Image (cartoon, rainbow, N blue to C red):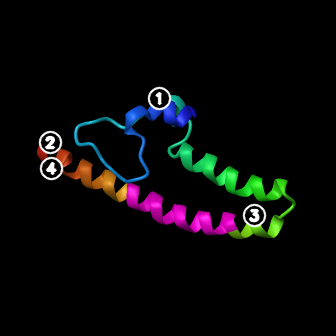
Amino acid sequence: MWVLATLGPRWTTRIIVLPGEPLVASGPYKYFSHPNYAVVAAEIAVLPLALHLPLLALIFTTLNAAILVIRVRAEARALSAMREPLVRAAS
């Protein structure tokens, strides 16, 4: 809920970069660059473990980690593409 409250209407599952808008640096974003993913990763690991399903926890945690690598790279590319025109304009 902290992540959702911090992002407000900017929260989405899509990768959207708002030109000219600063990155969110308050709330949990002071401490983690991707706090929502940390929460989801914990849920994916803890829920099967609470039901005594360690193999399922391992499988889904591993699959989630692979997806997050792809997702975080895509977000980094989107953010760097947004910053490139700003850097060129300042040069």
The mark found on residue 52 in the picture is none
Seen at 76% across and 68% down, the residue is 56
Residue count near mark 1 (Cα–Cα under 10 Å), binned few <14, some 14–19, many ≥20: few
Mark 1 → mark 3, Cα distance in angstroms: 31 Å
Across and down, in percent, residue 12 comes to 41, 46
**Does the residue at mark 1 contact the one at mark 2 (Cβ under 8 Å)?**
no
Q: Which residues are magenta?
A: 60-75
**Does the residue at mark 4 contact the one at mark 2 (Cβ under 8 Å)?**
yes
Does the magenta run of residues contain 71? Answer: yes
**Residue 67 located left or right of residue 18:** right
Across and down, in percent, residue 6 comes to 48, 31
Tell me the residue that label 4 is attached to: 88
Mark 3 → mark 4, Cα distance in angstroms: 46 Å
Seen at 17% across and 50% down, the residue is 85
Identify the amino acid type marked 4: Arg
Is residue 23 placed above or below 74 in the rendered structure?
A: above
Residue count near mark 2 (Cα–Cα under 10 Å), binned few <14, some 14–19, many ≥20: few
Identify the amino acid type marked 2: Ala
**Residue 43 located left or right of residue 65:** right
Tell me the residue that label 3 is attached to: 57
Residue count near mark 3 (Cα–Cα under 10 Å), binned few <14, some 14–19, many ≥20: many
> Mark 1 or 3 closer to N-term?
1
In the structure shown, which secondary structural element does the residue marked by tag 2 occupy? helix
In the structure shown, which secondary structural element does the residue marked by tag 4 occupy? helix
Tell me the residue that label 1 is attached to: 26
Q: Residue 76's image quarter?
A: bottom left
Tell me the residue that label 2 is attached to: 90
In the structure shown, which secondary structural element does the residue marked by tag 1 occupy? loop
